[in-house]
Image (cartoon, helix red, strand yellow):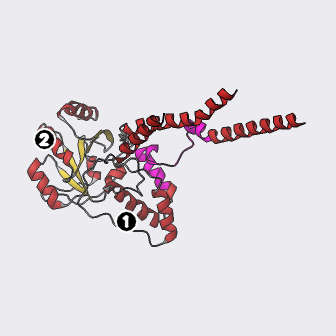
Amino acid sequence: MMRLLTALLMALSVAMLAPQSASAQSALPPAPYANRQLDDPALEAKASALMHTIRCLTCQSQSIADSDASMASDMRSEIRERIAAGEDPEAIRAWLIERYGDWISYKPTNDPILWPLWAAPVLLISGGGWLAYSRMRRRKGAKA
Amino acid sequence: MKMKRSLILWVPLGAYVIFLAIASLGLNRDQQTVIQSRMIGKAVPPLEMPAASSSKPTLSTRDLANGKPRLLNIFASWCVPCIAEAPVLMQLAQQGVPIDGVAIRDARADVDQFLTRHGNPYERIGLDARSTLQFYMGSSGVPETFVVDGKGIIRYQHIGVIGPQDVDTILQKLREAGA
């Protein structure tokens, strides 16, 4: 059992260390607002919140806020400039979804396929509550 | 009863091992998803671009709606797979297929050098220095090729290198777009 567990853990760490495929990058310098924050902290906070929930198209397990891919840099700059121009973050998200599909956004939607996921916490908590309640009642009954 | 109890104690560990097994299998799966553009059937967004090369005029996406279906090829001088598709694009251009290019995050000298070395199948080449056209078109990488009909409507998106085996499909899509 222990040996199996060790083997599994080792397999896990080896898989995690495997190098990311290095993709070709442009030689151009990054776009103006790719790595520069907006001067207004409130606007930067809005932009940052959005950028953390937009998936990078090149490094698909990262958000564009975390990725060094040139396309992610360009998208960060695009988002910051749009927010500085007064656009609403959710409008920018909708604009991107219109072009790339739901896939580009990490923010969960109300799609029917996700309903079980939304219901799961409610079901688990009420199930646990019921279990605890019936146990306590049984114990009380035994004491009496 | 005691036997049953101790068995139950193993259940969380068992669940954990099952979770680890599923997680490590998932790590080996190919995680790159191909993201098709949702803009197929919609018009190419209007965008003015500077010229990407010294030899060809620039491309304004407004000019795409000139009555004749064409290919819009997204490439870059720094893109290694683009070298692989260059001869196929040359062959398509020689067959009379109009091809416009958009160079992504590129510099004019580099584009010139790329075209000298690998051939120039393009009628016009626009420079997209900040991937803007890609965002507008729902394009997620380089190279990609769009079939645009005579009214400027996007009809088809080919993601990745156009190999010799893709030529028939591309020609077919061009015919469907009215070529």
* Residue extending furthest toward the bottom: A39
Count all numbered tags in the image, as a single digit: 2
Which residue is under mark 1?
A35
* Mark 2 secondary-structure assignment: helix
Residue A41 visible in this rendered orientation of the protein: yes
| Side (left or right) of B139 relative to B17 | left
Which subunit holds the residue at mark 2?
B
Is the N terminus of chain B in the top left, top right, bottom left or bottom right quadrant?
A: top right
Identify which residue is drawn at 62% across, 39% down.
Answer: A120
Q: Residue at the location (37% across, 37% down)?
A: B28
The crowd level at tag 2 (other Cα within 10 Å; few <14, some 14-19, many 20+) is some
Task: Specify start and end residues of the magenta stretch as a single range.
Answer: A91-118
Estimate the spatial distance between the alpha carbons at disc 1 and disc 2, rounded to whole Å: 37 Å
Front disc: 1 or 2: 1
Q: Check disc 1 and report its element: helix, strand or loop.
A: loop
- Subunit under mark 1: A
Let me know if residue A42 is in the magenta part: no
Could you tell me residue B98's position as x and y percent? 18, 43
Q: State whether residue B138 appears in this view.
A: no
| Magenta span main SS | helix
Q: Which mark is residue A101?
A: none
Q: A8 or B104, which lies in front? A: A8
The amino acid beneath tag 2 is: Pro
- Percent across and percent down for residue A140 are 85, 38
Question: Residue at label 2?
Answer: B87
